[in-house]
Amino acid sequence: MIADIPTFKPGDELTREGIRAELGGGSQGGICPSATTPTVSLYSDTNVGDQYGYHDGWLQEQDSLGPIFEYTGAGTQGDQSFDGRSGSGNAAILYHVEQERTIHLFIAVGKLPNSDTKIHRYVGQFKVDSKRPYYERPGIGSDQNPRKVIVFRLRPIGNFYRGSADFIPAAKQTRFEFVRGHATRPLEVLRRKIQKSGRAPSPATNVALQREELRDELETKLMTEGQDIGFAQVRIKGMTDTFVSGILNRTNNTLYEPSGSTTRDVLREALMQLLDFSRYFPSTPTQPLRRMLLLPGLPDEDTLGLLAEHNVGIIYRNGSGGFTEAPAVHGQPNPDGHLTPCFDCPHRESGTPLHI
């Protein structure tokens, strides 16, 4: 059962008591799943966000699917997650479709006269972005320790309110940040969504699933071998969106962009992502950035030539379930034409860690 649309409209200003009278939810906190209606109420307050170094709001850019509102997850200390007490709210957002809940977003706009009671403006009904539900960024907790923060990407459904003060400020300069370790459970999230749907996954979902499986397997292998593995995020001067890379190996300065298919159209998108990201990555004469596509198999010869022209190598899952590398060297494949095991490549034996 999906909840009826509330009687209040986008742009209306209410107290939390008035919101709870209709939607339910908690009297405190930013993420409030309701026990009385199938809804999740989200409360955003810029003053609170500023205390922890984040800013919820609309992106000034939008893609082919329309506008995006970024909302920061719950949890003030340690890495934010989808587990535990604070993680339950994050899970309620992420799995709202599977739980048949609707999301309703409110932004604090002030207080009642002579009172500490906050007034919240109703922004509208939302859903989590199906293409990229969330990403992680480095942050600082209330204990002043570094951590990972979950940032949800929300898409409006129907009418919505968007004021000029509700946009995320554009970056004043291009900034590159490294986030060490695994991304937070993208493979587990995808598998759960497939299981909860009760339907056979679509071809596009299968491609996404294979992409995340490849990423998880290579990340685990490299980390087990002691490599300094993570991912990077880039905010570009004058823009508000945050771009997140594939796997970044800082030990040998290699960037891997995973792809769940070797078909031309899917690889074209992965190649564009890799080339775009690599423009902002640090590189030195002694340790240039190596660009690699991570694939479920070898593509056709013409695609191999295209990748070689852009000095992009390939690492792919072989018949034994491991990984084999076909590196591009100075725009050309290996001179002897042979494929060598990725982790035995001579150029991997030296090099100092990259400090970003």
Image (cartoon, grey):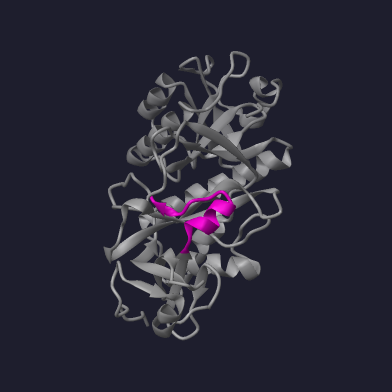
**Image quadrant in which the N terminus is located:** bottom left
- In the picture provided, is 353 more to the left or to the right than 247? right
Q: In this view, does 154 lie above or below 195?
A: above
Q: Position of residue 108 (x, y in %)?
A: 44, 64
Q: Name the image quarter holding residue 239.
A: top left
Seen at 35% across and 59% down, the residue is 155
Question: Magenta segment: does it hold 185?
Answer: no
Q: Where is residue 221 in the image (x, y as percent from the top left)?
A: 67, 42
Give the magenta-colored segment's residue range: 44-58
Seen at 45% across and 80% down, the residue is 17
- In the picture provided, is 227 more to the left or to the right than 132? right
Foreground of the two, 16 or 130: 16
Seen at 31% across and 47% down, the residue is 62
Q: Where is residue 324 in the image (x, y as percent from the top left)?
A: 58, 33
Q: Is residue 96 visible?
A: no
- In the picture provided, is 87 more to the left or to the right than 270? right
